[in-house]
Image (cartoon, grey):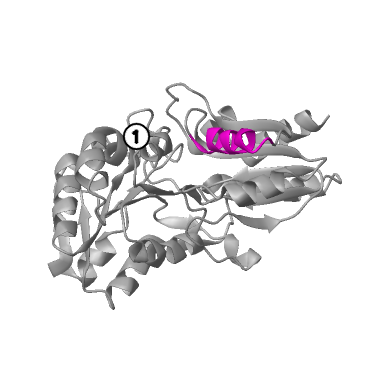
Amino acid sequence: MSATTEKKPRLTTSAMIASIASEGQRVKAAPFGKALVDLAAARPDIVGMTADLAKYTDLHLFAQAYPDRFFQMGMAEQVLVAAAGGMAKEGFVPFATTYAVFGTRRAFDFVHQVIAEENLNVKLCCALPGLTTGYGPSHQACEDLALMRSIPNMMVIDPCDALEIEQAVPAIAAHQGPVYMRLLRGQVPLVLDEYDYQFELGKAKLLRDGKDVLLISSGILTMRALEVAKSLDEIGVGAAVLHVPTLKPLDTQTIVREARREGRLVVVAENHSEIGGLGEAVATALLSEGVAPRFRRIALPDAFLDAGALPTLHDRYGISSAAITSSVKGWLD
């Protein structure tokens, strides 16, 4: 290096661990890992297992607290799932973590045959669900809910924020049978505490009411829906938000009851492909009950998505707060 050459700092990407929190938004660190550590103190049957991703699913906190109950299976998701099934057969309650693309796409047959067919008590908790990473199709799990909803015996959970993850961990541990839960890791937004929220398996919750629009959502799109509702308030549009954290079994009764109210546009918003997710589940439920409101969907396209920065991608694919607000306004005109 010459004397006149400056050494520039190395540029790195944060696409894999980028937070979904907006600037200045309240967050809690590692809610899943901390909740599992707390629960395991009174539950010696709980074990933690991962496919070389403890740090990136917050399971490293469990490994530090209970090293004798932590199992690192390496980069072998099929082995992870099969071993978790074996643990469940021996009376343990395994919480198995990896990225959602690997736990669902790569290990699908093992989840289907080893865990679900025998109705084993395995909790599969998978990070980077939907469009929560900018690493492109290899890491964007845009089909995970469709895959897991299609498996008999499988309960499917899509939590919104840190509070819900904290509440969901003991709830799914108490449930007897296999569970797939989407996992938010790292600095996770905190929003539901403002709504006196309590997670219940299989229950949808009306977070706020409104006379003009009903936003039905799950996961991080509930956070966005709440932001959209506040924006619509400013122009005199009343927007209700119905949060649906359990996609299977679906709380059809609550969804139908809210969609039956006359005069409201019903919009389903999800961080998932338009194929096989919450939108199709809600549409089927309404059609089956003979309910036909004005109905629209916000979802990721049936396509391989781009790589890039998350804010840019969320705008591009219509799931940012601004994009959703614009879509809803257009449908109301």
Q: Quadrant of the C terminus?
A: top right
Q: 92 or 126, which is in the foreground?
A: 92
Q: 190 or 150, which is in the foreground?
A: 150
At x 40%, y 56%, the residue is 186
| Residue 30 appearing in the image | no
| Residue 281 appearing in the image | yes
Question: Dot 1 corresponds to which residue?
Answer: 139
- Asked if residue 77 lies left or right of residue 287, the reply is left
The kind of residue tagged 1 is His
| Magenta-colored stretch includes residue 16 | no
| Magenta-colored stretch includes residue 286 | yes
**Image position, residue 243 (x, y; %):** 59, 51
Task: Find the residue positioned furthest to the bottom.
Answer: 42
Task: Find the residue positioned furthest to the right.
Answer: 236
**Image position, residue 276 (x, y; %):** 47, 31
Query: Quick one: SS at disc 1?
Result: loop
Q: What secondary structure prevails in the magenta region?
A: helix
**Image position, residue 175 (x, y; %):** 36, 62
**Image position, residue 129 (x, y; %):** 41, 42
Q: Quadrant of the N terminus?
A: top left
Q: Would you place residue 57 above or below residue 319 in this image?
A: below
Task: Find the residue positioned furthest to the top.
Answer: 303
Q: 298 or 7, which is in the foreground?
A: 298
- Asked if residue 306 lies left or right of residue 80, the reply is right
Q: Which residues are magenta?
A: 277-290
At x 58%, y 57%, the residue is 25
Q: Residues within 10 Å of mark 1 (few under 14, many from 20)?
A: many
Q: How many marks?
A: 1
Q: Would you place residue 310 above or below residue 58 in this image?
A: above
- The image quadrant that residue 216 belongs to is top right
- Asked if residue 130 lies left or right of residue 178, the reply is right
